[in-house]
């Protein structure tokens, strides 16, 4: 039996640590731990709720906008404040553009290297790579000339003795299975993805005023002045500039990202049988279509035990089923008390004990839905869409499964989505759905402005006494909720239950593991010194752990350390 | 020559906010002119390359892990930054300035001139104030940025 820890070491102890026990080449025990205290909600106590979003968007360096929007939604929910349609559409477009950007970056720049062996590119035939890529889609940048240029670029890197951005991959690992040409296609698209994710980010910038920290939201709406003829406002020029960026991103998602994920999945069909873990799925509806946020374009709800027939929809932030079901348990987390407590009653008092396998071992609390752990993220969102018969979700899921079936030469079914690869597939499906909804919401905004509606804001007014609100958002990494208690117009309690808290949850007081921990059980480990398989499964969730410290370490120590015990 | 000055760090985590603090100080005390972009980028990690392409010169201000007393300022050259080897990444938060430069050196579009003004932190505990030693370093770090901007590079 081998025991090992994958622990990114920095001087400032942040991040995710995974401990696993391997017996006969398979993981039989796992612990997920966050090594950094995240009590930053405490900064908000006593502050003006109208300003909370300015602070919450600093919670996380990658997902600034999602925390800004969840925060204003929480305060608006407490006030029962309706939101003008222009503001809803502008927020929706920001959220969609952010998600398109984030999902593309996650696949190409964070997790593709778990499946792609860059050194194999040198063996690839560019003409053959081009014809494979052209058989997958009619994207214009897949020519043999393009592939040959990328191969030369990689050769230059290898000849220099440095692998540059790919230096941290597990090259030549026995679990790498793609043919050389597919590796070449992936690297070519890695480079193109750098360009296309930037366009999505520029859309956030146009609407948000700037990135990475948007300036345009407000409790009650947005601050974008709307005047189709003014240079200083959201005008026709800006709308069309946005549309042209959007069209490019939509094309990349549908013609490059989706086919690439299907191709990679088709060569690793084994990974449809690993990594299911917790199959209770939670997602929330998003992209509101009315002022009171009662109708949404994206469905959400709870699926127990992977059984789509038991799907229980969540109808909105006011849905009592949702509002009552969420609790957080700190039996195995470094906080006082055990819980479970509802987020409005939530406490953030640290009690550090050191890493104890049967005691407290993480700074992440254990969120529970009706007392059970739940997996969140694109897979939960796509399954909610599939279960509720959402036409876009069904269309793109079926298209992806049939593409994977053709490549893998086995029948890919919705049941196979409960897996490590299923999470990647579902993320691609969700991105494709969002790419269509981006165009729809751009049109809704444009039509609304053209018909003469310039309303952007409803003034918030705070009553005497105590009120409570919850703001949710189906973020790129899954269900995000901010829970606020306001007393006489000042923040009395604030708890952010973030997607990664659901997925990286430690055991709860009943001893039930969270999704990361459960998903690692049974994963094969070919080489304990190089646990590529652990990275594959953990990366498939798109972890967002170190919300959010940044420090440059000139010694290069900001790397994951694998320690075999 | 297009130049950018970027503060990196989380303003909610004590001295990690040094980069944004120096940017705020520069913005309120100096006229840098419209040809110089100055921005508090927070903790952009994987998004950082987006803010680098198109610039000839970038000056970063960031907290650094160096063995020196809090408030110490160290200058790092482009070569020194890129020499810090990238490692296995678990989450999108971990990539840093060196990763962004390495990615763009491969993909194209990396700025040629890069300097990091690094300040050694005392504490990274939650809170929105800088410790006294680090707060005292803000004007000196800002002066260093201005000095770097004044340097003439053979383009």
Image (cartoon, rainbow, N blue to C red):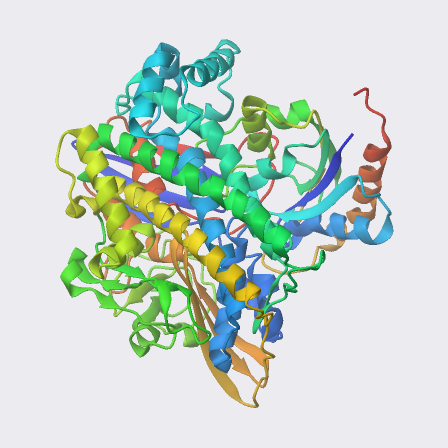
| Residue A1 appears in view | no
Of residue B69 and residue A517, the one placed in the foreground of this image is A517
Q: Is residue A107 above or below residue A303?
A: above
Q: Is residue A267 above or below residue A298?
A: above
Q: Give the residue at x 26% y 41%.
A: A420
Q: Give the residue at x 22% y 59%.
A: A389
Of residue A207 and residue A502, the one placed in the foreground of this image is A207
Most distant residue in the front direction: A451
Q: Give the residue at x 39% y 37%.
A: A107
Q: Quadrant of the C terminus of chain A?
A: top left
Residue A226 in the figure: left or right of residue A526: right
Of residue A315 and residue A504, the one placed in the foreground of this image is A315
Q: Is residue B104 above or below residue A10?
A: above
Q: Give the residue at x 47% y 16%.
A: A154
Residue A183's image quarter? top left
| Residue A136 appears in view | yes
Q: Quadrant of the N terminus of chain A?
A: top left
Whole-percent x, y for residue A426 in the image: 29, 46
Most distant residue in the bottom direction: A464
Of residue B122 and residue A181, the one placed in the foreground of this image is A181
Whole-percent x, y for residue A378 in the image: 33, 51
Whole-percent x, y for residue A466 in the image: 51, 86
Residue A298 in the figure: left or right of residue A217: left
Whole-percent x, y for residue A418 in the image: 21, 47
Residue B119 in the figure: left or right of residue B31: left
Residue A146's image quarter? top left
Residue A151's image quarter? top left
Q: Is residue B17 above or below residue A320?
A: above
């Amino acid at each position: 039996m081998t025991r090992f820890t994958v622990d990114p070491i920095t001087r400032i102890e942040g991040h995710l640590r995974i401990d696993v026990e391997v017996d006969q080449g398979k993981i039989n025990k796992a612990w997920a731990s966050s090594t950094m205290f995240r009590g930053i909600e405490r900064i908000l106590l006593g502050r003006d709720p109208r300003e909370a979003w300015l602070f919450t968007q600093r919670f996380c360096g990658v997902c600034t906008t999602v925390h800004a929007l969840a925060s204003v939604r929480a305060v608006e929910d407490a006030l029962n404040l309706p939101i003008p349609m222009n503001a809803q559409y502008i927020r929706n477009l920001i959220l969609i553009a952010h998600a398109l950007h984030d999902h593309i970056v996650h696949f190409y720049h964070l997790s593709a290297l778990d499946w792609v062996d860059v050194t194999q590119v040198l063996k690839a035939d560019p003409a053959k790579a081009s014809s494979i890529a052209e058989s997958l889609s009619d994207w214009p940048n897949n020519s043999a000339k393009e592939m040959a240029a990328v191969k030369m670029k990689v050769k230059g890197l290898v000849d220099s003795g440095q692998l540059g951005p790919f230096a941290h991959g597990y090259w030549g690992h026995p679990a790498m299975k793609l043919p050389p040409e597919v590796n070449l296609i992936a690297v070519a698209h890695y480079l193109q993805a750098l360009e296309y994710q930037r366009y999505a980010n520029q859309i956030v910038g146009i609407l948000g005023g700037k990135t990475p920290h948007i300036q345009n939201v407000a409790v009650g709406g947005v601050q974008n002045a709307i005047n189709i003829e003014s240079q200083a406002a959201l005008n026709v020029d800006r709308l069309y500039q946005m549309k042209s960026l959007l069209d490019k991103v939509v094309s990349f998602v549908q013609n490059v990202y989706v086919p690439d994920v299907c191709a990679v999945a088709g060569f690793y069909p084994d990974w449809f049988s690993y990594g299911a873990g917790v199959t209770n799925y939670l997602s929330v509806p998003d992209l509101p279509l009315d002022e009171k946020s009662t109708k949404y374009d994206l469905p959400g709800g709870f699926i127990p035990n992977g059984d789509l027939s038991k799907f229980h929809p969540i109808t909105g932030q006011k849905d009592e089923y949702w509002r009552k079901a969420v609790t957080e348990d700190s039996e195995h987390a470094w906080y006082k008390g055990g819980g479970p407590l509802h987020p409005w009653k939530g406490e953030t008092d640290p009690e550090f004990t050191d890493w104890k396998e049967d005691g407290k071992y993480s700074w992440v609390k254990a969120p529970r839905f009706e007392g059970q752990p739940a997996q969140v993220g694109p897979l939960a969102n796509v399954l909610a869409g599939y279960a509720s018969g959402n036409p876009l979700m069904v269309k793109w899921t079926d298209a992806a499964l049939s593409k994977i079936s053709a490549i893998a030469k086995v029948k890919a079914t919705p049941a196979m989505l409960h897996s490590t690869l299923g999470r990647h597939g579902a993320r691609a499906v969700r991105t494709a759905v969002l790419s269509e909804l981006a165009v729809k919401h751009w049109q809704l905004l444009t039509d609304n402005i053209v018909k003469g509606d310039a309303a952007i804001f409803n003034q918030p007014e705070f009553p005497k006494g105590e009120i409570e609100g919850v703001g949710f958002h189906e973020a790129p990494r899954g269900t995000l909720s901010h829970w606020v208690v306001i007393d006489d117009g000042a923040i009395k309690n604030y708890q952010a239950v973030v997607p990664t808290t659901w997925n990286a949850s430690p055991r709860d007081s009943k001893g039930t593991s969270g999704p990361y921990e459960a998903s690692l059980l049974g994963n094969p480990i070919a080489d304990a010194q190089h646990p590529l398989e652990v990275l594959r499964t953990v990366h498939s969730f798109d972890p967002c752990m170190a919300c959010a410290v940044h420090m440059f370490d000139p010694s290069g120590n900001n790397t994951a350390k694998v320690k075999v015990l | 020559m297009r130049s950018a000055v970027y503060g990196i760090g989380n303003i909610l985590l004590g001295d990690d906010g040094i980069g944004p603090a120096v940017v705020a100080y520069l913005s309120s005390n100096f006229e840098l002119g419209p040809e110089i972009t100055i921005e508090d980028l927070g903790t952009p990690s994987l998004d950082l390359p987006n803010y680098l392409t198109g610039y000839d010169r970038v000056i970063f201000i960031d907290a650094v892990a160096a063995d020196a007393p809090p408030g110490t300022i160290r200058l790092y050259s482009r070569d020194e930054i890129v020499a810090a080897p990238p490692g296995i990444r678990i989450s999108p938060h971990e990539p840093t300035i060196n990763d962004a430069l390495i990615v763009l050196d491969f993909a194209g579009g990396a700025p040629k001139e890069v300097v990091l003004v690094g300040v050694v932190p005392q504490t990274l505990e939650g809170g929105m104030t800088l410790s006294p030693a680090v707060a005292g370093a803000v004007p000196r770090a800002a002066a260093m940025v201005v000095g770097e901007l004044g340097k003439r590079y053979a383009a």
